[in-house]
Amino acid sequence: MQDFEGLLRGLKLKVTPRRRAILEVMAAGSTFLSPEEIWKKVGEAGTNVGLPTVYRILEELAGGGVVTRVLHDNRQLYYYLCPNKGHHHHFVCLSCHKVEDVDLCLGEALEQEVKLRIQGALFSHILQLQGLCRECREKGGKA
Ligand SMILES: [Zn+2]
Ligand SMILES: [Zn+2]
Ligand SMILES: [Zn+2]
């Protein structure tokens, strides 16, 4: 069980039943979800919330770094709540939407190089690794 209240307080957001319900739904699986999927699951779990509110809350949480935005080749934006904090990256399966942590970052060397080239200030990087997971590849799946 994750400390949702701590997460929300860290973003200076009030702990509301809607925010809580969204985080609970997202924490229940290890796949990335569309706002519509989250909205449906939150409704099924008994919390009444409109789809625009779900969009707004997801963007609040993504802006604060609590949830990760996942970009899909189908251009739909998805969201993922990772239990692991600290800097790492995600492998996302474009077919079954599973997310796996990648505890490997070559970003530091890259950041050093980019800093030299742009001569500006660099704050962070985003890297999304995508493809097919092993099960989907064995099934001959497609993204
Ligand atoms: Zn897969
Ligand atoms: Zn993660
Ligand atoms: Zn990195």
Image: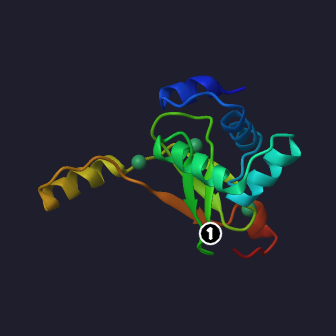
User: In x, y percent, where is residue 111?
Assistant: 27, 51
- Report whether the residue tagged 1 is closer than 8 Å to ligand 1: no
Residue 37 in the image, given as x and y percentages of width and height: 76, 57
Residue at the image position 71 percent from the left and 52 percent from the top: 31
Look at the image and tell me in which quarter the N terminus lies: top right
Quarter of the image for residue 26 reads top right
Few, some or many residues within 10 Å of mark 1 (<14, 14–19, 20+): few
| Residue nearest the observer in this picture, 98 or 58 | 58
Q: For the point 54% across and 43% down, which residue is it? A: 61
Residue toward you, 109 or 12: 12
Q: Label 1 belongs to which residue?
A: 76
Q: Secondary structure at mark 1?
A: loop
- Relative to 121, say whether 2 is above or below: above
Label total for image: 1
- What is the basis of the colouring in this image? rainbow
Q: Residue furthest left?
A: 119
What residue is shown at x 78% (from left), y 68% (from top)? 138
Q: For the point 53% across and 60% down, which residue is it?
A: 129
Name which residue type carries label 1: Gln
- Residue 91 x/y as whole percent: 59, 56
Position of residue 7 measured from the top left corner of the image (x, y, whole percent): 56, 29
